Image (cartoon, grey):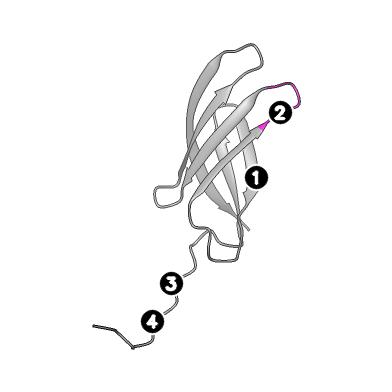
């Protein structure tokens, strides 16, 4: 059976096209999120110039961010912080 009724476009996520501050103990970062409405899950990773690596996952439904950080000395850290919308 084929449904020929038009489908409504998916709503654009609350964070689309906006900036949010991620705050952990002693650390804060401002992130800007794509406004294309197609990218709705964010797992962000990067490597610092000193070799440290960071991965964080933003949970907008609960207003928190989870992060995993490996320092250049090899120590590993897990962090949980808040997400706050910026104007």
Label 2 residue SS? loop
Where does the image place residue 78, in percent across and percent down from the top left? Answer: 48, 24
Of mark 1 and mark 3, the one earlier in the sequence is 3
Of mark 3 and mark 2, the one earlier in the sequence is 3
Label 3 residue SS? loop
Residue on which the image places disc 2: 48
Residue on which the image places disc 3: 10
Q: Which of 56 and 22 is in front in this view?
A: 56
Residue on which the image places disc 1: 30
Label 4 CA crowd tier, 10 Å (few <14, some 14–19, many 20+) = few
Residue displayed at 23% across by 83% down: 1
Q: Name the main secondary structure of what is drawn in magenta.
A: loop
Residue on which the image places disc 4: 7
Residue displayed at 45% across by 51% down: 60
Q: Is residue 22 above or below residue 13?
A: above
Of mark 4 and mark 1, the one earlier in the sequence is 4
What's the magenta region?
A: 47-51
């Amino acid at each position: 059976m084929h449904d020929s009724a038009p489908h409504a476009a998916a709503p654009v996520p609350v964070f689309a096209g906006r900036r949010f501050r991620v705050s952990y103990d002693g650390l804060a970062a401002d992130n800007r999120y794509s406004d294309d409405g197609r990218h709705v899950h964010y797992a962000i990773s990067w490597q610092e110039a000193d070799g440290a690596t960071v991965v964080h996952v933003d949970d907008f439904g609960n207003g928190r961010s989870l992060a995993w950080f490996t320092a250049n000395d090899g120590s590993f850290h897990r962090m949980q912080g808040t997400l706050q919308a910026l104007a």
